[in-house]
């Protein structure tokens, strides 16, 4: 799988579980199917955030594992 396809898969996984999953759940979900891409998860999350497609929301229970949701706070 190429990186751009993987990044879209990360986005669609976040969309399907909007606000429910942290990087840990994303990693567990995707690593079973695409183990060759696991070194790229954090980069994909960062790029999706920079593009405004996703944002992180503080997880009070585990601050080191923010949850991911769609879009920016300002609606962009």
Image: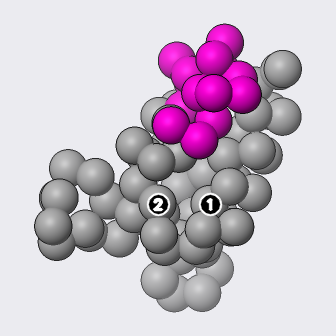
Compared across the picture, whether 70 is left or right of 28 comes to right
Checking the image for residue 75, the label placed there is none
| Mark earlier in primary sequence (2, 1) | 1
Q: Which residue is mark 2?
A: 21
Q: Which residue is mark 1?
A: 14
In percent of width and height, residue 19 lies at 49, 73
Quadrant of the image for the N terminus? top right
Quadrant of the image for the C terminus? bottom right
Predominant secondary structure in magenta?
helix
Q: Residue at x 53, y 45 (%)?
A: 26
- Mark 2 and mark 1: Cα distance apart in space: 7 Å
Q: Residue at x 75, y 57 (%)?
A: 12
In percent of width and height, residue 9 lies at 76, 44
Tell me if residue 52 can be seen.
no
Colouring scheme, one of rainbow, by chain, secondary structure, one colour: one colour
- The kind of secondary structure element at disc 1 is helix
The stretch of residues the image draws in magenta is: 28-41
In percent of width and height, residue 47 lies at 58, 43
Mark 1 surroundings: few (<14), some (14-19) or many (≥20) residues within 10 A: many
Tell me if residue 57 can be seen.
yes
Mark 2 surroundings: few (<14), some (14-19) or many (≥20) residues within 10 A: many
């Amino acid at each position: 799988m190429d990186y751009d396809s993987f990044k879209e898969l990360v986005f669609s996984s976040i969309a399907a579980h909007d606000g429910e999953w942290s990087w840990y759940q994303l990693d567990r979900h995707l690593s079973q199917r695409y183990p060759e891409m696991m070194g790229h998860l954090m980069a994909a999350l960062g790029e999706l955030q920079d593009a405004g497609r996703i944002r992180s929301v503080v997880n009070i229970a585990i601050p080191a594992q923010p949850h991911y949701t769609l879009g920016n706070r300002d609606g962009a």
